[in-house]
C-alpha cells in the first residue's frame, strides 16, 4: 500500500512550462502588430543583404544579443551563451547578419546568414536571428519556411531552437521544435500570460535553412509613435 506522502506527491500537478506552444491562428485574433518584411525590395535568393541592426515598428532584428557567443557547427550558427543585460541587439559581421528574400514567389521573408556569408547559397537561412521588442510581450508567433520535403537519407525533419529572454538578459525558456515541411505556423504564450518576453533568438538545423515571416505580437494598438492601451484613446 502506498504511503500517504507518495499519494500526495502523485496528486500534485506537474510544473507548468514557462512558455507554451499554442496555435498561431489563435493568437492572430489577440495580437495586433505584424511584421511581414514587405517594405524591403522583392529579390529572389540570395535576396537583399541587411547589415547592421534592422528597425521595424515595435521591434528590431539582428543576428544576436550583446553578450551572446556564436559558434559554427556544420555551417549553422549555434548560440553558446546567454545575453548580457540589459538586452540589446548586436549585428553579425557584414554579409553574415541577415537578408530578406522573396521565397516561393509568395512573400518577402527574413533569413539569418551564416558563414561563408552573402551571397553564398549555403549561408542563407542557416544563421541566427534575434528579435528585440520595444515592449515586453506575453505572446508572439511567426511563420517559418523550411525544407519542403525530406532529402533522401535525411531521416528526420529539420529543427529550430527558440530562446526567450527577459529585458535583464535572463533566459525564460528554450524550446527545440521539429519543423513542418514547407511553411509552418508557430505560436507561443507565456505561462500565466506574464508579459516579460523582451526578445527571442532563433537558430535552426534544417537541411536548407529557414526563412521567417509574419511575426505577430502586442495586444495594444500603436498609432504612429504613440502607444495607447486598449482602454485609452488618443486625444484629438
Image: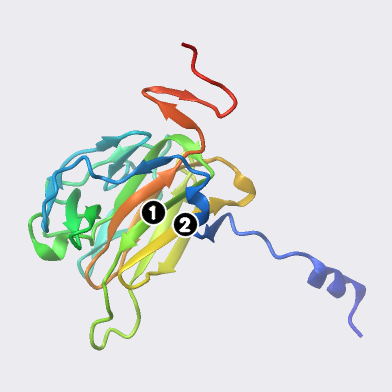
- The kind of secondary structure element at disc 1 is strand
Please name the residue that numbered disc 2 is placed on: 24
Q: Residue at x 22, y 70 (%)?
A: 208
- Does the rendering let one see residue 80? no
Placement of 152 over or under 103, stated as above or below: below
- The kind of secondary structure element at disc 2 is helix
Q: Residue at x 50, y 60 (%)?
A: 23
Extreme residue toward the left, this view: 119
Please name the residue that numbered disc 1 is placed on: 142
Q: Is residue 26 left or right of residue 97?
A: right
Q: Are marks 2 and 1 in contact (CB under 8 Å)?
A: yes
Q: Quadrant of residue 85?
A: top left
Placement of 33 over or under 215, stated as above or below: above
Residue 160 image offset from top left, x and y in percent = 36, 64
Mark closest to the chain's N terminus, 2 or 1? 2
Q: How many marks?
A: 2
Placement of 23 over or under 36, stated as above or below: below
Amino acid at each position: 500500500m502506498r504511503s500517504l506522502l507518495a499519494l500526495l506527491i502523485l496528486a500534485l500537478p506537474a510544473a507548468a512550462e514557462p512558455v507554451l506552444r499554442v496555435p498561431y491562428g489563435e493568437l492572430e485574433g489577440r495580437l495586433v502588430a505584424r511584421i511581414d518584411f514587405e517594405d524591403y525590395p522583392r529579390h529572389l535568393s540570395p535576396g537583399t543583404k541587411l547589415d547592421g541592426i534592422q528597425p521595424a515598428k515595435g521591434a528590431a532584428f539582428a543576428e544576436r544579443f550583446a553578450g551572446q557567443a556564436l559558434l559554427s557547427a556544420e555551417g549553422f550558427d549555434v548560440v553558446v551563451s546567454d545575453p548580457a543585460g540589459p538586452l540589446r541587439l548586436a549585428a553579425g559581421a557584414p554579409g553574415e547578419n541577415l537578408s530578406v528574400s522573396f521565397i516561393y514567389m509568395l512573400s518577402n521573408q527574413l533569413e539569418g546568414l551564416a558563414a561563408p556569408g552573402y551571397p553564398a547559397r549555403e549561408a542563407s537561412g542557416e544563421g541566427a536571428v534575434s528579435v528585440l521588442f520595444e515592449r515586453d510581450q506575453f505572446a508572439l508567433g511567426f511563420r517559418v519556411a523550411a525544407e519542403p520535403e525530406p532529402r533522401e537519407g535525411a531521416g528526420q525533419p529539420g529543427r529550430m531552437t527558440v530562446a526567450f529572454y527577459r529585458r535583464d538578459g535572463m533566459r525564460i525558456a528554450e524550446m527545440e521544435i521539429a519543423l513542418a515541411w514547407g511553411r509552418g505556423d508557430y505560436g507561443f504564450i507565456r505561462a500565466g500570460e506574464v508579459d516579460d518576453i523582451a526578445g527571442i533568438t532563433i537558430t535552426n538545423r534544417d537541411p536548407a535553412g529557414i526563412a521567417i515571416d509574419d511575426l505577430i505580437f502586442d495586444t495594444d494598438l500603436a498609432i504612429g509613435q504613440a502607444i495607447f492601451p486598449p482602454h485609452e484613446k488618443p486625444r484629438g
